[in-house]
Image (tube, rainbow, N blue to C red):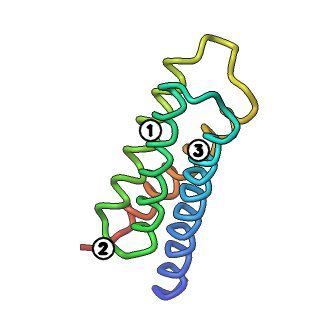
Amino acid sequence: MTPETIHSSFLRLRVLAALLITLSGIGQVAALWFRDLTGAALVDALIGVVYIIIGIGLQGQSRFTLFLGIAAPAAAAALVLNTTPDGALSALQIGRLLADLAVIVCSTLVLANTGD
């Protein structure tokens, strides 16, 4: 593989991570219209706004947003897993966790192959 194709494939991973985290953030903010307005709903919406900002940042070339693309979804996934009773995950929560995992994997791969 040439360096250009390697760069192109990691750029695609970065764009995929940006797309996934942005869509997840939009979904979390949009969920305010379908849920009761509780503290948990507002925390989810705040996480959604953070996700949208990270998604915008992932469109650039900063390594800092790659770190955020790893840390924020990992923290949000830990929050979901710790606050949900065992066996009570809904299909939407499972989808959100899978999207978080995909963003973490994509961001980690791109960060690991970023040259200094």
> In the figure, residue 114 lies in which quadrant?
bottom left
36 displayed left or right of 50? right
Image depth: mark 3 or mark 2 in front: 3
Kindly identify which residue carries mark 2. 115
x and y percent of residue 47 in the render? 45, 42
Residue at x 37%, y 44% (from the top left corner): 71
Residue at x 54%, y 84% (from the top left corner): 5
Mark 1 or mark 3, earlier in chain? 3
x and y percent of residue 11 in the render? 50, 75
x and y percent of residue 103 in the render? 53, 52
Mark 2 or mark 1, earlier in chain? 1
72 displayed left or right of 77? left
Q: Residues within 10 Å of mark 2 (few under 14, many from 20)?
A: few
Query: 29 or 16, which lies in front?
Result: 29
Mark 3 or mark 2, earlier in chain? 3
Q: Is residue 96 above or below residue 52?
A: above
Label 3 is placed on what type of residue? Gln
Q: Secondary structure at mark 2?
A: loop
Residues at circles 3 and 2 in contact by the CB criterion of under 8 Å: no
Which numbered tag is attached to residue 74? 1
x and y percent of residue 7 in the render? 47, 80
Query: 103 or 21, which lies in front?
Result: 21
Kindly identify which residue carries mark 3. 28
Query: 55 or 69, which lies in front?
Result: 55
Q: Residues within 10 Å of mark 3 (few under 14, many from 20)?
A: many
> In the figure, residue 46 lies in which quadrant?
top left
